[in-house]
Amino acid sequence: MKLKYNPPGIVKNIFKHFHWNTTNDKILLTFDDGPNPGTTEKILILLNQYNIKALFFCVGNNINKNNELTKVILENGHTIGNHTFNHKVLNKLSYKNAKEEIEKTNSLLLNKFGDKIRFFRPPHGKFNFRVKKLISDSGLECVMWSLLTYDYQNDFKKVRFAIDNYLMKNSIIVLHDSNKNKNIIIDSINYIADSVYQKGFQFGETNECLR
C-alpha cells in the first residue's frame, strides 16, 4: 500500500507497531534517499542553523559511494536509518532478497562507522504484512509518517499545501535528500521551520520522539 499526507487511522491501527507520530508532541524531521552530493550539504547547513536534529533514511548504495557525507551526517548529531541497500520495493522481492537489502545496509553502517541502526523506512512507503514481519525479524522499528510533503515532485507550492494543512504538534515529516527536489529543498526546510515555530511547536531528536 502507498500512504499519502497523514495516513488514515484504520491503517495506523492495523500496523500499530509502526511509528506514525512522535510520542512527545514534538516534530521529527526525516529525509529519505541520501546521502546525495549537492543536497546533503545544503540540508546539513540549514539544520545546523535551526539547531534541528533529523533522521536520515539512507540508501546503502549511496552510503557506500558517499562515505564522507555519511560521516558528516553522524558527526552533526543526526540519526541514520535504513532505507534498504538499493531502494527496491520490498513487496516485490523474495523474503531472502528483501532481508539481504536490509542486512547489507545495517552491516555497512556498523562496520564502516560503528553505528548500529535502529530504524527502518520502506522505499516509496510501500509495505505489506510480509514486510512488517521482515522488519521485525531484522530487529528494526518501522518509521512511517504523518506528513508527506511531496517535495520529490519539485513543486514548492505542494510542500506549502502539505505543511499548511497537515502539520500537527506530533508530526513525522518526510522530505527527500535527492536530486528530485534539489531546487526547492532550501525553501522547503525554511518554510517548515518557520511554520513549526509560528505554531508554537518544537522539533525533537529521534530517540526522544520515537520512544
Image (cartoon, rainbow, N blue to C red):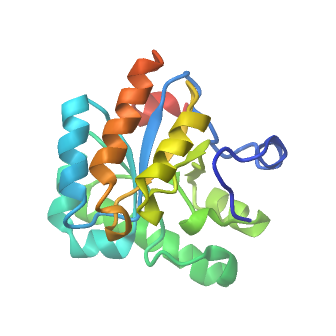
The C terminus lies in quadrant? top right
**Residue 138's image quarter?**
bottom right
The N terminus lies in quadrant? bottom right
Q: Is residue 195 above or below residue 111?
A: above
Residue 76 appears in the figure: no
Side (left or right) of 125 relative to 149: right
Q: Please name the residue shown 66% across and 54% down the image.
A: 4
Q: Is residue 179 above or below residue 50?
A: below
Q: Whole-percent x and y of residue 74?
A: 24, 48
Q: Is residue 159 above or below residue 40?
A: above
Q: Whole-percent x and y of residue 192?
A: 40, 36
Residue at the left extreme of this rendering: 68
Side (left or right) of 8 relative to 77: right
Please name whichever residue, 201 or 83, is drawn nearer the observer in this view of the structure. Answer: 201
Q: Whole-percent x and y of residue 201?
A: 46, 19
Q: Please name the residue shown 46% across and 27% down the image.
A: 208
Residue 33 appears in the figure: yes
